[in-house]
Image (tube, rainbow, N blue to C red):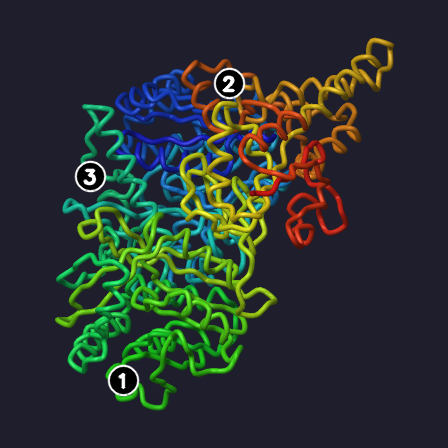
Amino acid sequence: MIIRHYCAYFDYRYLVRGLAMIESLRAHAPYARFYILALDERCASMLNTMGLAGVEVISLGDLEAFDPELKQARTNRSLIEYYFTCTPCFPLFLLKTRSDIDMITYVDADTWFFADPEIIYDEIGDASIAITPHRFSSDRQDLVRYGIFNVGWISWRADADGLSCLETYRENCIDWCYDRLEDDRFADQKYLDKWPALYPKLRIIEHPGVNAALWNIDNYDFRQIGQEVMLSGRRLVFWHYHALRQRPDGQWSAGVAPATAKRHPSLVDVIFRPYIRRLESLHSMLEKRFDSFAHDGMDIRYGSERPAALQTDERAPVSSPQSTKLTTGYERIDRDQAYRNAEDGWSFEDVARVQADAYAALIQQMRAGSVRRDFAVAVEAIRALNLSCPNVLEVGCGSGYYSEVFASLVPGGIKYTGLDASRAMIDLANERYPGLDFHVGDATRLPFADRSFEVVFNGVSLMHILDYELAIREARRVASRYVIFHTTVLRRAGQPIYLRKLAYGRPVVEIILSEPELRILFARYGLQVAAVLDSIPYDLTSVIGEPTYTRTFICALDAGDATARPLHLNLGCGGHFHAAWVNVDLVSRHQNVMECNILASLPYEDATFDAVYHSHVLEHLPKWKAPAFLDECLRVLRPGGIMRIAIPDLETICRLYLENLDGALAGDTEAAQRYDWMLLELLDQMVRNESGGEMARYWLQSPMPAEAFVIDRVGAEVEGFLQRIRSVVPPPQAPPRIVHDAEDIGRFRQGGEIHQWMYDRFSLARLLRQAGLRDVRVVSASESAIPGFAAFCLDADAVGRVRKPDSLFMEGRKS
């Protein structure tokens, strides 16, 4: 593993942002080490009390004792200017006092990471210094006078060039570091403009996703594809929230200009709102934990002292996400009542006109640059398809307002067709958008031939269709490339909930589906989830007693037709899954994986699946929990269905351990090396107290003993690891050993990485028979009673190479 070293500084006013930065970076780089300069005693005290793993807190007194000239500089500049002066002094202090730091990277506290920063280090390569340009967009070129480069990310290697740069930078800032533009100087920033000419081993980071901000976003095509945020086809690594601040009234000001909002309609929802939610959550945590914590609302770095030229305009505030205004008269009903009372309030002319007028107002706001969240998400979904002027059918089009949304915000536009069951809605659509193609029709019996449209866009209508499965199947039938289910209102689990309500004064029925059921229907009809976007909130907690949420699903079509397929469930899949399966894990890192607690009740009805599969999951459960877990797997498996399990094979591990022990005792040096690995394979993942354990340290050896044997045992996992670390110059070293306290050890051991039991072919077969399976047998990685299993490449790739060669594979059939 590669240990990267980061430093940052902040006072108690920026503590929340600093914590968010550390948290986001560590989510992608769990072994990163942080050195935080606490700029006041309150900040230092709270950080020390929190005791964050992998974070070393340095007090301002310690830095000033090391650098008396820095302390003296405090007397001749403002507080913010003094903080800027610390920018070179702190990393120089670390390189001078910490011999284990080979490279130090300064990161601004008001950044948030969206991807692994190894992307940046790949670009840095063997350079001694790395800096990031502002890359100002054309309308902000006047800001170049404040500096070509930004201080948000600077890396220095602990070599002659890196140290020389840092020492000169420190001397410059000690001498002059003021918050004004004077000659060729501005604060701690403009000194960087001279570095490319001074330091041949400097690397300018050109990746557009590094240090992205409002000052450069208009240079790029911004979009979210699944869980990844992309800038002109490159992953966003981190965003710099350089002028985000909270007003006294609690509103947040992001400074997003109307033109920028129109160009990137999902920018606020993707970049700013999640960050603000996390800041508010961390703020609440600190208030509960520390009685003395009270954020005074003043952001010293971007408060009134900051030059106006570097502050963004005061635009419309970013508040908590706006909610859809709910209509009145909710009543919970059952399915039979829903079918008996399926009043079609949408068919009335007065309802159609009131709704159309309401959306006309939103369209007007969109034209003025204020794009509502659901509009922005719809546009993002269409853009994510990368189709040139696609042929789109909107099912449930209402008065056709999305045709204008797409025409205004989708580059190149679309070829639009609209369909709605309400004649009144379609009459209004034809009145307001003459020349477009509108149809009156039933979503469950679409009047179009198979594969008539590249894209079928179901715009919020699924919740109003009682036969929603038929509507999903029909959408799949008439689409040739993608189906988008937009702003689908969902609950976490359970049967559909049926509601009667008054929509603009007329009764209608709504269905609240569960996400697990919806994903089952996608899998049944060959719709593979390509991306998931959060849409506008629609919370019915006060109506149904539990929260609801909305998601927009972008589904790609498989190679088949619209007929039903067998249903297969992959539990605890991690990052290895097939899109045709229903994939579930405790934590989802991919849009095709649904997040749920697989150790509790599975969110599916009895006898739902034709096959249930889990690979290297059972050994992570305590022995006493395994029967209940298998019972739950059998509950959702259909009679005659297959359960397939892959686990580490205890028998083979033990036999190889004993075989190589005998060889080592006989003086065979190669056997001794294999013995060392087999001892790790037997014990390490059961006894380790930190991620990776002794196995990861073993892999970092160069050369690695018994390498071919280890690769043969572990497979692609270790091969990929070795390729990554051996491409790094200099090669990474094993991290220093840390004595963990009991609380850290407990958290780690409850985190799911360790093995809590092991099985061989006898104990696993006995366990499966006790659970109620018959025809239990050992199989190979490519052999299965699940029809077509080998084609899914879950246990072996297309040429038969086994993904986890240390596995025992076993199947059984439900009676």
- Residue type (three-letter) at the residue carrying disc 1: Arg
> Can you see residue 268?
no
For residue 595, what is the image quadrant? top left
Tags 2 and 3 in contact by the CB under 8 Å rule? no
The answer to whether 375 is drawn above or below residue 354 in the figure is: above
Percent x, y of residue 724 = 66, 38
Q: What residue type is labelled 2?
A: Thr
Residue 783: which numbered mark, if any? Answer: none
Q: Nearer the viewer, mark 2 or mark 3?
A: 3
Do the residues under discs 3 and 1 have CB atoms within 8 angstroms? no
Q: Is mark 3 on a helix, strand or loop?
A: loop
Which residue sits furthest bottom?
A: 435
Q: Name the residue under label 1.
A: 423
The reply to whether residue 607 is visible in this rendering is yes
Q: Earlier in the sequence, mark 3 or mark 1?
A: 3
The tag on residue 297 is 3
User: Residue at point 50% right, 32% down?
Assistant: 30
Q: Which mark is residue 97?
A: 2
Q: Position of residue 202 (x, y in %)?
A: 59, 42
Numbered-mark total:
3
Position of the N terminus, as image quadrant, is top right
Q: Closer to the N terminus: mark 1 or mark 2? A: 2
